[in-house]
């Protein structure tokens, strides 16, 4: 069984991504690691090369500034990276995601067990989202995502590269009790503000092609203060990947004000859950989605109960 990792990166240093920790967390699980590097304005490429692992294969592909529809440039770059992969499984990791070393045996076993099950397109992970501080978790983020996919040319990165699809359908995936630690909202406030401002240039148009904003790439000194939304967050008392120890110790910004309210009586959490579960309540013009036609695409679940895999 051969496994190839892949990711995309652009201005990782500038925006404070833990991309070195991210890549290193996957290297023990793969035979090769493909990285698609955009036209960086910082020294991200030099930092990548300094990792010095022979498994790493870097290719530079500038991002098309005309791709401004719903983050499509991210999926396009991800597919370029995936097309360079080889092997049986492709392990995708984003620059702000890190795998915990204690989950390595579970991940290896899942790939081995599903290797000869052609109906399993991918392997889904549990997600832990952090916000503002490494000891604060946001339970409203997506709970599960596919991060390992089979070598199948019909499987493509979709949307803004958060997930995958196959012929217009969701993947038939196996849920495992392994975690992805998502640190996208645990970065210095200035880096967060600049990243938010710059990335909006790739979301000028929505999925239907309607223009929703007109924002240009702006230098850091022109970007306003970033405000962390902590209203639905909860404390986190578990461990982090060992690779994150130095970054966590080096945190130099003030933790956002945070007052924990149990989720069962947290109105912001309930509002967020309802908005995801019944979007028509908040956007009446949005058509109701009929899921009955996709029952054949129902996700397969690995041996452990899903209730266990959901527990954060």
Image (tube, helix red, strand yellow):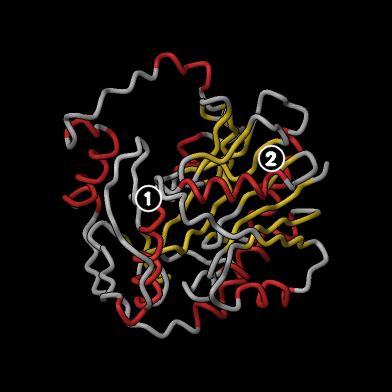
Q: Are marks 1 and 2 in contact (CB under 8 Å)?
A: no
Nearer to me, 290 or 259: 290
Q: Residue at x 52, y 66 (%)?
A: 239
The tag earlier along the polypeptide, 1 or 2, is: 2
Q: Is residue 151 left or right of residue 203?
A: right
Q: Provide residue 231's location: percent of width, then percent of height.
A: 22, 60
Q: Provide residue 17's location: percent of width, then percent of height.
A: 51, 69
Nearer to me, 265 or 185: 185
Nearer to me, 261 or 93: 93
Q: Residue at x 24, y 74 (%)?
A: 257
Residue with the most extreme front position: 66
Compared to residue 203, the image places residue 46 above or below, namely below
Q: Quadrant of residue 251?
A: bottom left
Q: Quadrant of the N terminus?
A: top right
Q: Quadrant of residue 13?
A: bottom right
For numbered disc 1, what is the local secondary structure?
loop
For numbered disc 2, what is the local secondary structure?
helix
Q: Residue at x 53, y 70 (%)?
A: 11
Question: Could you classify mark 2 by the number of other residues whose Cα lies within 10 Å: few (under 14), some (14-19), or many (20 or more)?
Answer: many
Q: How many marks?
A: 2
Q: Is residue 109 left or right of residue 135?
A: right
Residue with the most extreme top position: 293
Q: Provide residue 275's location: percent of width, then percent of height.
A: 24, 40
User: Residue 184, labelled with which disc?
Assistant: none
Q: Provide residue 285's location: percent of width, then percent of height.
A: 19, 29
Nearer to me, 5 or 85: 85
User: Residue 110, labelled with which disc?
Assistant: 2
Question: Could you classify mark 1 by the number of other residues whose Cα lies within 10 Å: few (under 14), some (14-19), or many (20 or more)?
Answer: some
Q: Residue at x 47, y 17 (%)?
A: 295
Q: CA distance from mark 1 to mark 2?
A: 24 Å
Mark 1 — residue? Answer: 141
């Amino acid at each position: 069984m051969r496994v190839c990792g892949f990711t995309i990166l652009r201005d990782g240093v500038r925006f404070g991504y833990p991309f070195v920790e991210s890549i290193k967390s996957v290297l023990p699980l793969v035979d090769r690691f493909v990285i698609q590097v955009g036209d960086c304005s910082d020294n991200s490429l030099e930092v990548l090369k300094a990792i010095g692992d022979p498994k790493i294969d870097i290719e530079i592909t500038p991002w098309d500034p005309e791709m401004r529809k719903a983050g499509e440039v991210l999926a396009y770059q991800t597919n370029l990276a995936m097309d360079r992969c080889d092997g049986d499984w492709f392990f995708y990791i984003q620059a702000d995601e890190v795998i915990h070393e204690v989950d390595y045996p579970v991940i290896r076993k899942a790939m081995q067990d599903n290797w000869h099950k052609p109906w399993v397109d991918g392997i889904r992970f549990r997600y832990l989202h952090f916000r503002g501080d490494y000891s604060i978790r946001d339970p409203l983020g997506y709970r599960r995502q596919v991060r390992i996919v089979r070598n199948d040319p019909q499987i493509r990165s979709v949307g803004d590269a958060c997930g995958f699809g196959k012929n217009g359908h969701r993947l038939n995936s196996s849920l495992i009790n392994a975690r992805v630690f998502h640190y996208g909202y645990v970065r210095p406030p200035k880096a967060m503000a600049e990243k938010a401002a710059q990335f909006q240039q790739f979301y000028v148009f929505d999925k239907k092609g309607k223009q929703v904003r007109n924002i240009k790439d702006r230098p850091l000194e022109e970007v306003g203060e970033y405000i962390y939304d902590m209203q639905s967050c909860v404390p986190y008392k578990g461990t982090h990947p060992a690779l994150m120890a130095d970054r966590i110790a080096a945190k130099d910004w003030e933790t956002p004000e945070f007052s924990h309210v149990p989720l069962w009586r947290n109105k912001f959490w309930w509002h967020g859950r309802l908005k995801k579960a019944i979007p028509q309540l908040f956007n009446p013009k949005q058509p109701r989605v009929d899921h009955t036609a996709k029952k054949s695409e129902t996700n397969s679940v690995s041996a452990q109960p899903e209730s266990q895999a959901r527990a954060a």
